[in-house]
Image (cartoon, helix red, strand yellow):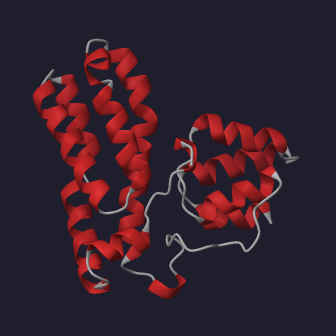
Amino acid sequence: MTEDELVIFDHDFALKQFSGNETMLITILGKFVSQNENFNEQLISSFKSEDLTTAKRLIHTLKGVTGNLGMTALHHACKEVEDNFDSLAGDLTKLQDNLHEFLQLVELTILTSQKYGTQDPVANPTETTKIQETEPETEKQKLIAALQRNEFLSDKKLEQYLSALTLSPADEEELRKLIDDFEYPAAISLLN
């Protein structure tokens, strides 16, 4: 699985971490949301004030928590930022460019966690169970499958999908907006 295809929330993995206790998982996800809802602002503030120790701690802590909760895409993104931290920290402009997708992924992961507790677990679209019985063949099918799995789509991966679709400019613009706003069900509807 490539980084572009990592799952936002691996329900099965997370549930195993809590010995199948769905109520405990929902409680912990609620705590994750409350503790990290201001993460992006805190991280940006740390960089602007050149408090690199706090920035490193924030990223490292988030990496550990997301790894334990099955938030695969964000866990890998935290690891990448952490591994490249020293080279990025010296150039604020380069850092801001590189953090754009990371900050979007933090937002999407928090949004997914917030929504999780309000959905019927049986019908929860964030589960990693098979969504399609057959492997998607076309780019459109692959995009729909990725959206159904709540995968984070990097700009590069989204461009790859869009270049293979035959959408009107208005529909393409609307699809981009829906995906940017993490409105995946509406994006799927537009594609169908």
Q: Quadrant of residue 82?
A: top left
Residue at the (70%, 51%) spot, across then down: 175
Residue at the (56%, 43%) spot, across then down: 2
Query: In which quadrant is the C terminus drawn?
Result: bottom right
Q: Is residue 171 above or below residue 103?
A: below
Q: Residue furthest top?
A: 90
Q: Residue 68, how many percent across, how many down?
A: 27, 60
Q: Quadrant of residue 11?
A: bottom left
Q: Is residue 168 above or below residue 83?
A: below
Q: Residue 106, how many percent across, how many down?
A: 37, 48
Q: Residue 98, how many percent across, how many down?
A: 42, 26
Total numbered labels placed on residues in the image: 0
Residue at the (38%, 48%) spot, across then down: 74
User: Viewed as shown, does residue 83 lie left or right of 42?
Assistant: right
Q: Is residue 24 above or below residue 132?
A: below
Front-most of 142 and 177?
Answer: 142
Q: Is residue 123 above or below residue 112?
A: below
Q: Residue 110, how many percent across, how many down?
A: 35, 58
Residue at the (43%, 24%) spot, across then down: 97
